Amino acid sequence: MSGKNSGYLDMELLRFTTAGSVDDGKSTLIGRLLYDSKAIFEDQMEAIERASVRAGGEQVNLALLTDGLRAEREQGITIDVAYRYFATPKRKFIIADTPGHIQYTRNMVTGASTANVALILIDARQGVLEQTRRHAYIASLLQIPHLIICVNKMDLVAYQQEVFEGIVKDFEAIASKLSIKDVRFVPISALEGDNVVTRSENMDWYDGPTLMYLLENIHIGSDINRDDFRFPVQYVVRPQSKDWPDYRGYAGRVASGVVAVGDTVTVLPSGFSSKVKTIDLYRESLDKAFAPQSVTITLEDDIDISRGDMIVKSTNGRAARNDQNIEMMICWFNDKKMVPGGKYALKHTSAEVRCMIKDVQYKMDINTLEKEEKDLSVGMNDIARISVRTTKPLFFDAYNVNRMTGSVILIDEATNETVAAGMLL
């Protein structure tokens, strides 16, 4: 492999999600990012131009780049999570374009669960709406480290500075009530390209960075928990071949922290300790591994370890919590309502246990950001705080400490459908 390609593979990956009300221009914005950063193939561009002409548009409809479902194209809206990949010389990107409708809250939760950055679009003519509050709340709930508020359609309000500043003030009032660490504001026109990739000549009053500059340069290195080593074991590697007769490795993805050869580690739930003998990455041996690398670890001692166990550092970092009674915030995904006292499968990292719903403490009205404590029936797209009891203890961290080891999904055992995503408290 050439040095050039190797450098490309080593580039930092930024995942971002887009959210906004219907017709706020999310798909057009992503189309503009891809178009202006030269991330579109010629045949794609030609197909979009033809589709735009057929639809009777005066200019190329860049939204068609992300609106993949036919129903979306006909309605001009996004009704599913559309993932797109592109790269610039500085970074690789994965975009999750999520719907604005309230009935697609679950899609936004799915698209945003792994994001470093959330782009929230606000129509400059409409200002901050209930849906803006909802999207900000979900971004806060999912602990997305960085928010970029794109005040779109500035061309339709004559690029007025007062309109932009009014929206900034209104959103800051919402952000102060939520646990949002880093918020940036950019006035843009996705349709005309103002401040998306190139600076706008129409808004000389704005001296901040363009959206693309922010995406390329926002610091995400500290978004992952580097302190607490967590290694959920996914698979026990035992080749038992002539070349490797006694090899016994534990494969998985480093969820957080760093581990080095020679470190003393503890295996949960058994509590046995050993030292790291080797860290293997395909045919290469590493001195250390860090999140989010996928590696195989071997230990100096023969310990009974299986899928679902977790390897942690014995000394530094905080201890993983160990409990059967667990509280979490959930977003319900399923048409069928949650059954109080019902039994579900719970998947946490590589471990799977059964659990019973003990109680629902409250639901969130995510439009008003108030708790609903009277109507406790949990249906599709509802966000609620619940308590569950698991059949055996889980080793976990609170979601706000570690997004990887603080997240779970609930599965209906009868249908095998994922019915909820949960953030452990």
Image: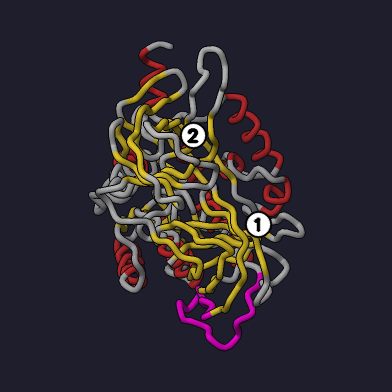
Q: In which quarter of the image is residue 384?
A: bottom right
> For the residues marked 1 and 2, what is the alpha-carbon distance in whole angstroms?
25 Å
- The amino acid marked with disc number 2 is Ala
Q: Residue at x 40, y 19 (%)?
A: 284
Between 48 and 373, the one lying in front of the other is 373
The residue pinned by badge 1 equals 418
| Residue 416 percent location from the top left of the image | 72, 54
Look at the image and tell me in which quarter the C terminus lies: bottom left
Position above or below: 389 against 142: below
Q: Nearer the viewer, mark 1 or mark 2?
A: 2
- Magenta stretch? 361-379
Position above or below: 7 against 326: above
Res. 118 visible in picture: yes
Look at the image and tell me in which quarter the N terminus lies: top left
| Residue 387 percent location from the top left of the image | 53, 73
For mark 2, give the secondary structure.
Answer: strand
Left-right relation of 330 to 398: right
Res. 91 visible in picture: no
Left-right relation of 339 to 229: right
Q: Quadrant of residue 10?
A: top left
Q: Which of marks 1 and 2 is nearer the N terminus?
A: 2
Is residue 42 located in the magenta-colored stretch of the structure? no
Q: Which residue is drawn at 53% across and 57% down?
A: 408
- The amino acid marked with disc number 1 is Thr
User: By what rule are the colours in the image chosen?
Assistant: secondary structure
Q: Name the residue furthest front.
A: 302
For mark 1, give the secondary structure.
Answer: strand
The residue pinned by badge 2 equals 251
